[in-house]
Amino acid sequence: MSNNEDYPRVNRRSLLKLAGIGGLVTATAIGIKLLPASREVESTIDENITADRAWELLKVGNQRYIDRKAFHPHQTGQRMVALAKGQHPFAIILGCADSRVPPEIIFDQGLGDLFVIRVAGNIVDDAIAGSIEYAVEELKVPLLVVLGHERCGAVTAAVKGGEVPGHISSLVNAIKPAVKSVQGLPGDIVENSVKANIKIVVSKLKSTQPIVSELVKSNKIKIVGGRYDLDTGKVDLIA
């Protein structure tokens, strides 16, 4: 159900005209909520959504973000109350912990839409794998996106090598195979390593037993890799 279905439809242009006539008049002040220009975001609560449809929703949301036309969907009090009864996210995002890459913002999604796991370097370990298994087994999420980004600090540290303090070494060690795999290739080694790391994590997850690998084989989950561009805000599939 839509968060806005109990309210009259008012387009944005009409409301702006109204605001121009009456001064600082807002939708809240006159007791009206706006419906988004597209109902695309409302379909994200479909419990039977496919992986391809889930990616389409992410792609459309990312384009809204790039165009500075975000809807900021599913952030109402009604949505919060509805989700208290249970969650049905349509995609898992395994992303980097970098503060510049928050999935709900860059994909323009809201409460209950995404099952987000964030760790520096978007690596996978047992705890992260367990979180993913819960999402695909119990919540039946059809799509998993491994989301890396350009100029990743964790990848840069792995490229530079040398000693790193504390538990940071566990992150660097997890990324080293990606760095090694691109040695000698043309282009920027950090950028090449970012992409290689995403692809390696995707491959690892596809073969993670016993739960994820079986769901991949039975086409109940799709795992893809995406790269976020810090300069443009765009997410491109690379795996």
Image: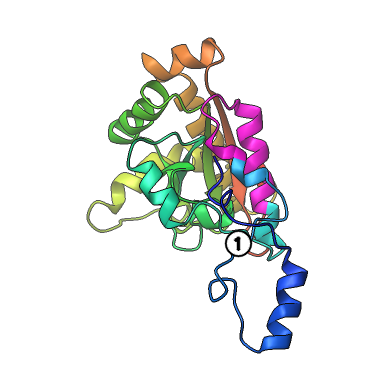
Say what amino acid the circle numbered 1 marks: Leu
Given residues 161 and 202, the one toward you in this image is: 202
Secondary structure predominantly adopted by residues drawn in magenta: helix
- Report x, y in % for residue 106: 57, 56
Q: Which residues are magenta?
A: 43-62
The image shows residue 63, relative to residue 141, as above or below, that is: below
**Side of 235 where 209 appears, left or right:** left
> In this view, which residue lies farthest toward the left?
166
Viewer-proximal residue among 72 and 28: 28
Q: Nearest the camera: 12 or 192?
A: 12
Does 207 appear above or below 30? above
Residue 35 image point, x, y percent: 65, 56
User: Which percent across, then down, holds residue 158?
Assistant: 43, 51
Q: Quadrant of residue 140?
A: top left
- Mark 1 Cα within 10 Å, few/some/many (few <14, many 20+)? some
Whether 46 is among the magenta residues is: yes
Residue 51, how many percent across, how many down? 60, 27
Q: Which residue is mark 1?
A: 230
